[in-house]
Image: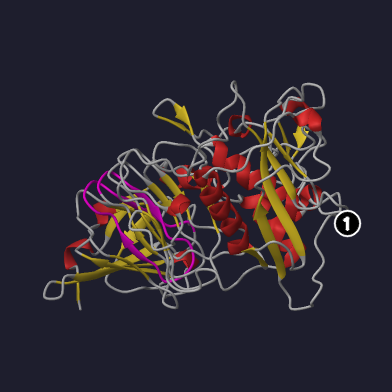
């Protein structure tokens, strides 16, 4: 490898950079728990929220001791004994309701050690589904927590002349969200607050903690807008069809995590291999609201088909702004997603401690790999590769920028040190702030090494495909 002689003894002064500030701001956008107060309410951590959702201590017992709660279910065809006539007229589920209920049950089985089998009886418990016609109690559906009574497992859905949303549940609509919500009750999850549709006129003001919204829990009544999220696109709202961040933590606390789900390499978003409708995007107009649960493998968030500016965070228990919505994609606690692909907008990508493959796509992107030996690709546009600590890229775990274009792209190390300048040299002499740029023309491979501590060796090292010059470095 040949050194870049023309850069020797060049001094590069500090420049104003906001790129790391943008990374840092978004990385902490959804901080929660501790002593935080949000909207005048205490902020709950994921575990605190899960505990509160489980405050009624309701759960099915594993009768056969096989480690999984095996539930059976029936779609009622006639009014059952003990039917409350105040509910009006009974009706059976239509074909679409049945199909969508199966998908909602599947979404719960994906994340926890529970299974659902259609049968007249049996298992560790039995669930039933039916419709009613009188909505005078103020609700659009209701279900019973498992408590050892005859109503365990029952869930009921309003269909009337004035309320039709339960007739045609589908991915992303309120009817599907309602199915997933009510099945959550039959599993033992309560609302994140002490409210019910039939009890007065509750609002978000009645929430116990700040994160009691549909941005965090499918069990909540309250709009995600209360936590500065936005699931509206094309003038229409979207809803989660599956358990969200806090729901996943809660049901796993009850029954254990299903680690066999998507335990191999999985793609979420465009080109999805997840096998679930809510994890798939097919066009720039797609609306995605989901929380990733994944059992292992090398996984990818692929948002390449979106044209809007996006912010993607690969850290567990984090949120991303995807496809023109805000805070609509999260990653469940304990999940490692390795890779992310941005779209054609000006995207911001944040990696995690794993070895990430981050691709910005078209647009002027800001990419931060974090820890691990990351592969960073800006794509078309003027891209900024940001480093927040020398440990983000060093000899032990070196990042590589795959498509660096001098005069267009930047390497931003301004957050690593308070040094006012870098001195580009041919060899380290033990002075803090010395930097070496190497480049091999035959291989088109280069590197940037910086001695931030004066130890006479580079404690920061990043590789490049393409040549970087001193003027491409932001300090």
Q: Residue at x 62, y 31 (%)?
A: 159
Residue 196 drawn above or below residue 315: above
Residue situated in front as seen by the camera: 416 or 456: 416
Residue situated in front as seen by the camera: 225 or 185: 185
Going by the image, does 397 lie left or right of 425? Answer: right
Q: Main secondary structure of the magenta part?
A: loop
Looking at the rendering, the stretch of residues picked out in magenta corresponds to 362-388
Going by the image, does 52 lie left or right of 382? Answer: right
Q: Position of residue 448 (x, y in %)?
A: 31, 66
Magenta stretch: residue 408 in it? no
Q: Residue furthest left?
A: 442
Q: Position of residue 85 (x, y in %)?
A: 80, 31
Q: Position of residue 142 (x, y in %)?
A: 73, 39
- Residue tagged by mark 1? 148
Q: Quadrant of the N terminus?
A: bottom left
- Note whether residue 104 is visible: yes
Q: Position of residue 403 (x, y in %)?
A: 23, 61
């Amino acid at each position: 490898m040949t050194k870049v002689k023309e850069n020797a003894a060049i001094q590069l002064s500090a420049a104003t950079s906001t790129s790391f500030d943008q990374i840092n701001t978004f990385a902490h956008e959804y901080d929660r728990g501790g002593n935080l107060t949000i909207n005048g309410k205490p902020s709950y951590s994921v575990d605190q929220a899960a505990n509160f959702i489980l405050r009624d201590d309701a759960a099915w017992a594993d009768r056969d001791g096989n480690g999984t709660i095996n539930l059976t279910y029936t779609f009622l065809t006639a009014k059952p004994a003990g039917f409350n006539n105040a509910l009006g007229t009974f009706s059976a589920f239509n074909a679409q309701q049945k199909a969508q209920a199966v998908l909602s049950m599947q979404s719960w089985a994906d994340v926890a050690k529970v299974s659902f089998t259609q049968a007249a009886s049996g298992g560790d418990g039995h669930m039933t589904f039916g419709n009613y016609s009188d909505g005078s109690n103020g609700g659009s559906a209701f279900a019973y927590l498992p408590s050892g009574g005859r109503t365990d497992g029952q869930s009921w859905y309003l269909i009337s002349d004035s309320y039709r949303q339960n007739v045609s549940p589908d991915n992303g609509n309120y009817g599907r969200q309602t199915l997933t919500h009510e099945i959550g009750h039959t599993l033992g999850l309560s609302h994140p607050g002490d409210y019910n549709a039939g009890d007065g006129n509750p609002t978000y003001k009645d929430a116990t903690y700040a994160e009691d919204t549909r941005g965090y829990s499918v069990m909540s009544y309250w709009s995600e807008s209360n936590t500065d999220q936005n699931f509206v696109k094309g003038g229409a709202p979207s809803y989660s069809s599956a358990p969200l961040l806090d729901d996943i933590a809660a049901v796993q606390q009850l029954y254990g995590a299903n680690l066999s789900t998507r335990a191999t390499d999985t793609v979420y978003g465009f080109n999805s291999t997840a096998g679930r409708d809510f994890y798939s995007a097919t066009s720039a107009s797609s609306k995605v609201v989901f929380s990733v649960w994944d059992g292992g493998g090398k996984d990818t968030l692929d948002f390449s088909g979106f044209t809007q500016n996006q912010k993607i965070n690969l850290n567990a228990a984090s949120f991303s702004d995807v496809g023109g919505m805000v805070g609509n994609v999260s990653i469940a606690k304990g999940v490692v997603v390795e890779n992310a692909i941005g779209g054609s907008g000006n995207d911001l990508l944040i990696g995690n401690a794993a070895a990430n493959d981050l691709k910005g796509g078209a647009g002027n992107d800001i990419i931060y790999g974090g820890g691990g030996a990351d592969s960073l690709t800006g794509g078309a546009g003027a891209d900024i590769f940001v480093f927040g600590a020398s440990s983000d890229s060093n000899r032990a775990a070196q990042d590589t920028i795959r498509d660096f274009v001098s005069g267009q792209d930047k390497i931003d190390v301004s957050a690593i040190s308070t040094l006012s300048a870098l001195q580009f040299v041919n060899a380290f002499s033990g002075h803090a702030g010395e930097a070496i740029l190497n480049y091999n023309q035959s291989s088109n491979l280069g590197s940037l090494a910086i001695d931030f501590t004066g130890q006479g060796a580079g404690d920061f090292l990043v590789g490049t495909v393409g040549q970087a010059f001193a003027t491409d470095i932001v300090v």
